[in-house]
Structures are given as C-alpha cells and as structure tokens.
Image (tube, rainbow, N blue to C red):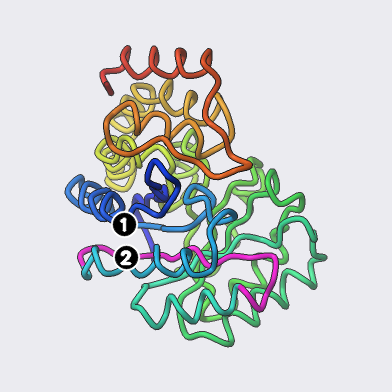
Amino acid sequence: MFEGTFTALVTPFTATGELDRDTLRKLVDRQIDAGITGLVPVGTTGESPTLTDEEHHEVIRVVVDQCAGRVPVIAGCGSNNTVEALEHTRFAKEVGAEASLHVAGYYNKPSATGFLRHFQLLADSVDLPLIVYNIPGRVGKNIDNETMLTLAEHPNIVGVKEASGDIDQMMDLILRRPPGFTVLSGDDAITLPLMALGGNGIISVTSNLLPGKMVELVQHMLNGDTAAARAVHYEILPVINALMGLDTNPIPVKGAMHAAGLLEETYRLPMTPLTDAAKQELRRVLKEHGVI
C-alpha cells in the first residue's frame, strides 16, 4: 500500500522557457531531505498538458535518476488518449518508476464503461502499479464508486488519488474498498478529515513549498495523534488556501516557490503569472506564516 506524503512535483523552467533539469534535481533533493514519502512528477502540478512527449519522459527520467531509489516515484502518465497514456506508462516502467498515476479522461468525458476499459487496458498492458486520479472539477466527469471498486479488483490498480470533493463518496469508498487499496487525498485542505475517515495520505501541492509540514501532519495522523495533526493543519491552512485559491494550480505554488528562491517563475501558455494583486496577497500570507 502507498501510504504517506507524496509531492505532486512542479516542473521548473528556465527564464527562457526550457526544462530546467538542474533545478528539478535540486527540488528532488530538497523533498527527500525533508522526509517526503515519494514524488509524483508530471501530473497537473507538473504542467503536463504543456510538455512535449519528449519533455514528459525527460522529467520522469530525471526524477527517477535523482531519487536513485531513496523514495518511490509515482510517474504521472495520464492522458485522455489511451494510446498516449500507455506509451507514458511503458516509459515509466522502463526507467524504474515504482508506479504510475492516471487522471480520468478529461474533455472527452467517458462513460463508466469507457473509464473501466481505459484503466483496465493500461493495467493489463504494463506490469506497474497504477493509481487512478479522480478529479471531476478538471475532467468534467466523476468516477463513481461502483466503477472504482470494479477497478480495485485488478491486481495492478492499487489506489486512487481522490479529489472529487465529495466526503460521502470518499467515506463509502473507504468503507467498501478491498484490503490494500489506497485512498490518497488529492486536496491538501481535506487531508486531515480524509485520513480521520481511514484514508492513507496525500498527493500534495503544498508540500512543494512546505514538505516538512505536510510530512508532519500526515505522520501524526498515521500515528493516531489527531490533536497534533490538527495543530499543524490549522497552522498551514492559510497557506494551503492561498495556494489553491488565488489562481489555478500550479500558478500560485510556483509563484510562492519563486518568492522563496526555489525556482524561476516561468509558465507556458495558456498558464500565466498571478496578477499583481494576487502576488501581493500571496506574499502577505507567506510572510505572515514565516515562509519567506
């Protein structure tokens, strides 16, 4: 079972827009030094929609290489094109990733049967643990629990990154899941309540900026110390809310990491920097909470 704090890693670019491999390696080391459980490159936070296939593979390769077995890599391999998702998954397996993360088919909004056939084909084709990513706010379609529980019967489909925002759905899934099936939060702000209900951790955006704090929160929950976890939760909640609320992820987190001196604030269209007003608010929150 994948359990703990996994960082949905940002993809750093140079000031001129190229992939910044040196900074990427430094970010990997910073995460590992902070005690992170594992890394998830080239997901939504990694700006996968604006990377070429070659860049997508290069990010996975660099992260796996820099981790050097110190923590597992769950490679973002998702696509709304099953053939493309399969190519990414095969590459991730070849370079040594420990698992793959696959978002539900965005834009084309598959039926339940479409979701089943897509994920089952991927799991059948590559012997690599697969985590499903359910995020209807971006995809436009929810993966219902009956579909998810059918997927969970596949030996290679080992968990879900749950970002439906529906606590009732999450509780029902946790209640009925088979042994060993991981439920990870896909929303930093509900990590504590989801784990209190039996969830296993988080694939986090905030841990790009505050890896130690997210590790601390999750570890307290795994240890059964809800009071200590609650204290950390409320300590960092204003930062989480700023990172999630000031603009579309990963714009605020990259802006915050730039303010902290961790990377260039470079995006690829159609992603653009924060407005001046949002930047001022972000810096206010970061200063108030001792991040910068």
Quarter in which the C terminus is drawn: top left
Pinpoint residue 289: horizontal percent, then vertical percent: 31, 17
Identify whether 212 is placed above or below 13: above
- Tell me which segment is drawn in magenta: 70-84
Quarter in which the N terminus is drawn: bottom left
Pinpoint residue 80: horizontal percent, then vertical percent: 69, 65
Measuring 63% from the left and 40% from the top, which residue is drawn there? 165
For badge 1, the amino acid type reads: Arg
Q: Which of 175/283 is in front?
A: 283
Pinpoint residue 193: horizontal percent, then vertical percent: 48, 37
Q: Quadrant of residue 221?
A: top left
For badge 2, the amino acid type reads: Val
Q: Which of 223/106 is in front?
A: 106
Q: Secondary structure at mark 1?
A: helix
Pinpoint residue 122: horizontal percent, then vertical percent: 60, 79
User: Tags 2 and 1 in contact by the CB under 8 Å rule?
Assistant: yes
Measuring 37% from the left and 50% from the top, which residue is drawn there? 7
The tag on residue 281 is none
Name the N-terminal-most of marks 2 and 1. Answer: 1
Query: Which residue in the structure is indicated by mark 2?
Result: 62
Q: Which of 217/38 is in front?
A: 38
Mark-to-mark CA distance, 2 and 1: 7 Å
The tag on residue 21 is 1
Measuring 43% from the left and 75% from the top, which residue is drawn there? 92
Q: Secondary structure at mark 2?
A: helix
Residue extending furthest front? 16
